[in-house]
Amino acid sequence: MRRRGDHVKRALLIVIDGAADRALKTLNGKTPLEVAYKPNIDQLATNGVTGIMDPIAPGVSVGSDTAHLALLGYDPFKTYTGRGAFEALGAGIKLQPGEVAFRTNFATVDEEMRVIDRRAGRYIEEAKEFEKLINSISLKTSNVKVLFRHTVEHRGVLILRGEGLSRFVSDTDPHKIGMRVLESKPLIDSPEAKRTANIVNEFTREVYKLLKDHPLNKSRVKRGLPPANILLVRGAGVLPNVKPLSERFKVKCACIAGIALVKGVAKAVGMDIIDVPGATGGLDTDVLAKVKYAIKALEDYDFVFIHYKGTDAASHDGNVWAKVKIIEKIDSAIGYLIDRVNLDETYIIITADHATLTEETRNHSGDFVPILIHGPGVIPDDVRVFCERACLKGGLGRIRGLDLMNIIMNYLDKVEKFGE
Ligand code: ZN
Ligand code: ZN
């Protein structure tokens, strides 16, 4: 409980996806965070405490879903129940316990079900029509209902709604061009998993039957576009069974993110989602819009989380300078922020959910990430730059992602005493 006369303390967590990196040749042995001109973030580093963080554990490479679970205070080894569930929640679907959700791709296959294009050209203007058709499918071998929702480009979500389902089934997506669509298989020896795999396979055949000769696809072919004649499914998941953040720490919390996956994780742990027009999650995302909404949200919420995706996208593209540039753009938005929030009452925490290696693998890695905390009562260290190298000397030392929420809630005086 807040005592009379106390300040109303708030916290704003800013996660810059995949911002951390290694010493890059293109940057003469420096990292994008080291090279980027970011006076505002560095000012927060100068006046705050910094450190390094292993999102899960040293050397453990993570997806954005498991990393965000950890950063939001949930042990992913205990709570992670597959990516599909987060995609569904992030797409605004009310997933119920027991339902199984998958991520899907519209794709192009030949007559032998060999994948020619995993994205069916990426942009599918007929997607809404196909969505209607797919939702008309009623399975012959079970009374499980299928619910398909197209999201963006070639992507979508499939929900299986009914009794006796399991998330332990394999993908039909072969993840490679030239390979045949895979049969979904049970991953554990259970009747539910076998049944679910059969349903996925029947569904896949039905989708192909519906779409292969559809006039809209014939018209696509005439226009030189690959037909969207199959749905590949992957990442089966169910709703994680977790106690919401609001109950654990008695805080009101909100998430501002562009991508469905992160919104879904936030929703799964009970955060409110604030949708921001222009927040696309890509390199063109409106960085300032998120900050403006966050400033407003801090009037109502104890804990606000902003997610920026562009840095990770630049790394997956292998584009070092795009990564540097997006960090600089985010810095200018943070400049706008620190001019407008009361820094005597607001904690600002900046970190990344994992490193993404722009030059080597162009993928996530198990490297550590830098972190900074700025706010009332924080004892500053001598670090003046927010980057991997400088933060090695920071006052927080080396923490795990799972420690972060406790550290933030401790500053907000929301952590209950352990023992007497
Ligand atoms: Zn990520
Ligand atoms: Zn990524």
Image (spheres, rainbow, N blue to C red):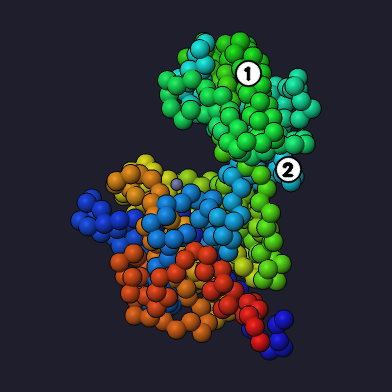
Q: Would you name the residue on which mark 1 appears? A: 205
Where residue 11 sits in the image (x, y, percent)?
57, 71
Q: Are the residues flagged by discs 2 and 1 in contact, CB closer than 8 Å?
A: no
Q: Is residue 149 visible?
A: no
Name the residue at 69% across, 54% down: 241
Q: Would you name the residue on which mark 2 appears? A: 98
Q: Amino acid at mark 1?
A: Arg
Where residue 138 sits in the image (x, y, percent)?
76, 22
On screen, 282 above or below 102?
Answer: below
Secondary structure type for disc 2:
loop
Name the residue at 25% across, 53% down: 24
Q: Nearer the viewer, residue 252 or 144?
A: 144
Q: Quadrant of the N terminus?
A: bottom right
Q: Would residue 381 be found to the left or right of residue 338 on screen?
A: left
Q: Quadrant of residue 33?
A: bottom left
Q: Quadrant of the C terminus?
A: bottom right
Question: Which comes sooner in the sequence, label 2 or label 1?
Answer: 2
Which label sits on residue 3?
Answer: none
Name the residue at 64% across, 61% down: 254
On screen, 208 above or below 418?
Answer: above
Secondary structure type for disc 1:
helix
Local packing at callout 1 (Cα closer than 10 Å; few below 14, some 14-19, many 20+) is: some
Name the residue at 22% across, 51% down: 25
Where residue 251 sits in the image (x, y, percent)?
68, 70
